[in-house]
Image (cartoon, rainbow, N blue to C red):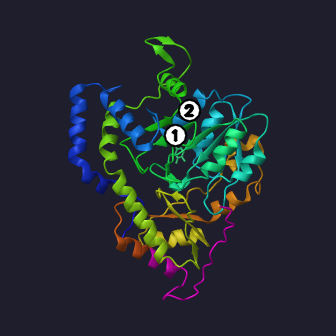
């Protein structure tokens, strides 16, 4: 049977095996596992690439969110506005600091935070907005940055899924007070283990982040603040530098895959991702809205095709946030999206015939045997605001 996976990390590794083994050997020979030269080198390369003044490597994407908010002094009594349709870490980090996550709805067309909902959620206690560039698609950065500036709020970009995406030609990750990246192995720049990065332009904020990353130390064993151990290992930084060399080519392939899906998919049965003008996404996921999602997923699995549901349960309805008292129906676009979303394989090692195979099975599921058939599916309506 033709098999199509959501990722092929082994094939990706084959492309760089020799280079990875060489840097691993260099780090092993140095025995400088913490704060070795590869960490600073990786930080400089990332800052240059993403057009920011400071890039600070940390232990995970989750820790980049946590440490960013510690540096922005977010804590008890503060409210942080964020989308409910995101990975748990975005909200978990707010709650871990004792602040209150204020969940708002998304734009049904882009799956990203809806600027109008942000505006309605601002109170006297609001300290920050977190935008998530979900699936590698940019949030509406100019509108949201204006909103943050106008209301004196910090702006944090959760760019865990969006390295390399641009909005109005400017890199995602360079718009907020801080931006957070993840190098979790499945990410577009995936490391060999956990890893993350904080991006910032402000000198003082960056210095604070560096301090907090290392238990708040200003000099050896002198602690100005309570921080954490948020460091990235030398070995992981050295390997990420190797992986970085393929990022542009891998992004190009993801965009190619998405364009091919867009061309082949019959939009009378599924709703393909919508990309507004001035947005250049990087397709961390290629996510459809589709009717009878669970049945389609099961059908594809039976035909050897892996898919993903990101995310089935919105964060405002998670048990751990029950004390915030959101009821089903509170964020209707988010809830509807959770019921209909399905991500298809889009990774850089796919061949065009894999995509042809996936699309033909989707059409088969909906009863489309030749172009022009109506089939049994229906496109999910989007109420585009962008
Ligand atoms: C949107 C988003 N935010 C935050 C994270 C957390 O990153 P990490 O898994 O590196 O802690 C992830 C990734 O898993 C993510 O997808």
Q: Is residue 2 visible?
A: no
Q: Which quadrant of the figure contains the N terminus?
A: bottom left
Q: Mark 1 and mark 2 in contact? Answer it, CB < 8 Å.
A: yes
Residue at the image point whose x is 20% and y is 28% from the top: 29
**Mark 2 beta carbon near ligand 1 (under 8 Å):** no
Q: Earlier in the sequence, mark 1 or mark 2?
A: 2
Q: Is residue 383 magenta?
A: yes
Q: Position of residue 339 (x, y in %)?
A: 64, 63
**Principal secondary structure, stretch drawn in magenta:** loop
Q: Secondary structure at mark 1?
A: strand
Q: Position of residue 70 (x, y in %)?
A: 59, 28
Which residue is under mark 2? Answer: 68
Which residue is under mark 1? Answer: 180
Magenta-highlighted residues: 359-386
Residue 112, which numbered label? none
Q: Secondary structure at mark 2?
A: helix
Q: Position of residue 224 (x, y in %)?
A: 54, 14
Gap in angstroms between the C-alphas marked 1 and 2: 8 Å
Where 212 sits versus 43, above or below? above
Where 168 sits versus 157, above or below? below
Q: Nearer the viewer, residue 198 or 92?
A: 198
Q: Is residue 134 visible?
A: yes
**What is the quadrant of residue 157 in the picture?**
top right
Q: Is residue 264 left or right of residue 331?
A: left
For label 1, count other residues whose C-alpha is less than 10 Å away and answer few (under 14), some (14-19) or many (20+): many
């Amino acid at each position: 049977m033709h098999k199509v996976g959501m990722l092929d990390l082994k094939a990706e590794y084959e492309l760089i095996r020799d280079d990875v083994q060489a840097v691993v050997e260099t780090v092993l020979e140095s025995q400088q596992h913490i704060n070795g030269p590869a960490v600073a080198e990786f930080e400089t390369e990332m800052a240059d690439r993403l057009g920011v003044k400071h890039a600070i490597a940390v232990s995970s994407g989750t820790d980049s969110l946590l440490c960013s908010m510690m540096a922005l002094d977010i804590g008890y009594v503060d409210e942080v506005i964020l989308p409910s349709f995101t990975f748990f870490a975005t909200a978990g980090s707010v709650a871990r600091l004792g602040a209150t996550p204020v969940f708002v709805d998304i734009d049904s067309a882009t799956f990203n935070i809806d600027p109008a909902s942000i505006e309605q959620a601002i109170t006297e206690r609001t300290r920050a907005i977190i935008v998530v560039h979900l699936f590698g698609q940019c949030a509406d950065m100019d509108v949201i940055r204006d909103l943050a500036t106008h209301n004196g709020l910090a702006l944090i970009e959760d760019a865990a899924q969006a390295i390399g995406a641009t909005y109005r030609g400017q890199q995602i990750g360079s718009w907020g007070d801080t931006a957070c990246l993840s190098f979790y192995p499945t990410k577009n720049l995936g490391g060999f283990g956990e890893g993350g990065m904080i991006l910032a332009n402000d000198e003082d904020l960056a210095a604070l982040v560096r301090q907090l990353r290392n238990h708040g130390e200003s000099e050896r064993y002198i602690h100005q603040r309570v921080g954490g151990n948020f460091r990235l290992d030398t070995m992981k930084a050295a390997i990420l530098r190797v992986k970085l060399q393929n990022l542009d080519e891998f992004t190009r392939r993801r965009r190619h895959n998405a364009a091919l899906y867009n061309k082949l998919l019959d939009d009378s049965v599924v709703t393909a991702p919508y990309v507004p003008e001035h947005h250049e996404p990087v397709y961390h996921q290629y996510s459809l809205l589709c009717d009878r999602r669970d049945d389609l997923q099961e059908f594809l699995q039976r035909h050897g095709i892996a898919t993903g549901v990101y995310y089935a349960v919105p964060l405002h309805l998670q048990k751990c946030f029950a004390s915030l008292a959101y009821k089903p129906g509170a964020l209707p676009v988010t809830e509807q999206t959770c019921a209909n979303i399905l991500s298809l394989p889009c990774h850089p090692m796919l061949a065009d015939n894999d995509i042809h195979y996936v699309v033909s099975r989707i059409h088969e599921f909906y009863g489309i045997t030749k172009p022009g058939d109506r089939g049994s599916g229906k496109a999910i309506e989007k109420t585009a605001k962008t």
